[in-house]
Image (cartoon, coloured by chain):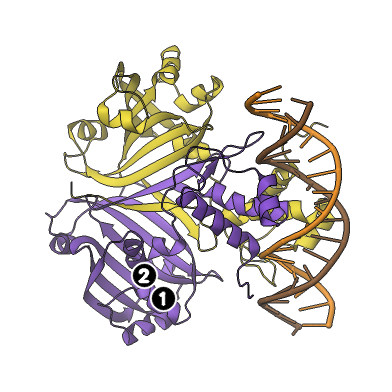
Chain colours: A yellow, B purple, C orange, D brown
Amino acid sequence: MARLEPLHVTLAEDFRRRIADGVWPAGESAPSEAELVRETGASRGTVRQALNALRTEGLLVGGQGRSPRVRKAPPAQSFSHFISFTQWAESMGRVAGQRLEEMARRACPAELAEELELPPGEQVVQLLRQRTLDGVPTMVERTTFVLDVGLHLFTFDTNSGSIFAHLASQGVDLARGRHTIDAVGADQTDAALLGVPVGEPLLRVRRLTRTRDDRPIEYSDDRYLPSRATFSIENTAENRSAMLHLNPQESA
Amino acid sequence: MARLEPLHVTLAEDFRRRIADGVWPAGESAPSEAELVRETGASRGTVRQALNALRTEGLLVGGQGRSPRVRKAPPAQSFSHFISFTQWAESMGRVAGQRLEEMARRACPAELAEELELPPGEQVVQLLRQRTLDGVPTMVERTTFVLDVGLHLFTFDTNSGSIFAHLASQGVDLARGRHTIDAVGADQTDAALLGVPVGEPLLRVRRLTRTRDDRPIEYSDDRYLPSRATFSIENTAENRSAMLHLNPQESA
DNA sequence: CAGTGGTCTAGACCACTGA
DNA sequence: CAGTGGTCTAGACCACTGC
């Protein structure tokens, strides 16, 4: 019996499923750690490691003295949902669509060169795409890839699916992302692609994605129709991990 | 020698300080776990618990086979920065200001009653405040408190500091928050308080804050000038904790 | 009071990395 | 190869909850 996953990951998935399936009903107490140790045969440390994962996801709350209680399950969000419009849509049973407006290889603009930690004049691959959800225009995506990664895209029909799924199959491992969120008025391009007046408020997310060894791979400027999508974040006092940085800007 | 904090918390703070002070220079390898065990005298499990905290904060990256490397320190963000404009400003050496426009006790509006899990007709306390950063208008805040918490505010000069600091001193323990982010055009009130035209794009954050035992305490609708503040989030593939939910909205 | 989770220890085996 | 972090175990003591 091959076991590719660590035991604590398997247990965490098992527990997540019990919550999703209502085996551990929302609002009630979950079984005690001692009980889970008896049931699973794993040691307490391993059981705790699994439970802690659910805690930081907000699926379990409380503790100290009484069994933790189960919260109503928010849809599980994996990292790929952060960076892939397609995977996000699919996770909700929606259909993501895309139309490539432009794809170009060119010298990296100065502002982006700094973000991507590239020397001046380095070549990059840039895309402009309109994204749809169930056929309705929802987002305008302006993405810049470092050259060696972007070259994979020329072997790929960019109108036919998820760029990130394609890159993953090529061995590109995205591991970390920084997302900066603000609001902008629609420019001419946004307005045309989203079917709204120029100046309409849009929710903008700028994202820098890195590999496991911290090399910047991709920068994207995505502008959403707020009537079509919003972001939400959960965070807790115990847990510093859900980091929402509120950055002051000098007056634009 | 009283030790109020758990050892792993003390160690984590120590390690964070070493990164901030450059004792562990950014970009270089941190000491191995074995080394830290020798140095601190703590067991490996405890050292790992401390290091894992820094990992999920994004201060350390990498692993398996080689020592983790240190990333340039993002400013440490505690939970209080999420929910308190004042504490956020202070953490950056800025000065937060506020002007109370309105404070009222009234029946809870229907949309909010659901969010706050209150029976229909329940009384709440509502505030409308203009917030400034270094004297410049930056945000308009519409906050609703459940009654027993809101009553604390009548014993408090709301023009003179942080509401959350005041509530904390009254024994109200905020523990968890859900933040929903989108973009809206400024309405008449926003426009007047922020000094921009009606329709100007604003970054809106709606927040529901809960106590440790999951009781909703406060709901707020905060609208920022994007030229004055943006949000950013860090997340990783290993770690599900930084949850960014991208929620579809039916057309408004 | 008994049961719970929070903390801490000591020791073990493995997979992976880099010289 | 030796050293690293990833995983897992077994057992211990404590602070806190609820009865």
Q: Which residue is mark 2?
A: B110
Q: Nearer the viewer, residue B20 or A150?
A: B20
Q: State whether residue B147 is above or below residue A195.
A: below
Q: Residue at x 33, y 46 (%)?
A: A181
Residue B169 lies left or right of residue A23; in this view the side is left
Q: Which subunit holds the residue at mark 2?
A: B
Q: Residues within 10 Å of mark 1 (few under 14, many from 20)?
A: few
Q: Which amino acid lies under the numbered mark 2 shown in the image of this protein?
A: Ala
* Residue found at the very far bottom of the displayed protein: B155
* Residue found at the very far top of the displayed protein: A155
Q: Nearer the viewer, residue B61 or A94?
A: B61
Q: State whether residue A244 is above or below residue A86.
A: below
Q: Which subunit holds the residue at mark 1?
A: B
Q: Quadrant of residue B8?
A: bottom right
Q: Quadrant of residue B107?
A: bottom left
Q: Which amino acid lies under the numbered mark 1 shown in the image of this protein?
A: Pro
Residue A78 lies left or right of residue B123; in this view the side is right
Q: Which residue is mark 1?
A: B120
- The first of marks 2 and 1 along the sequence is 2
Are the residues at dot 2 and dot 1 in contact (C-beta closer than 8 Å)?
yes
Q: Nearer the viewer, residue B3 or B91?
A: B3
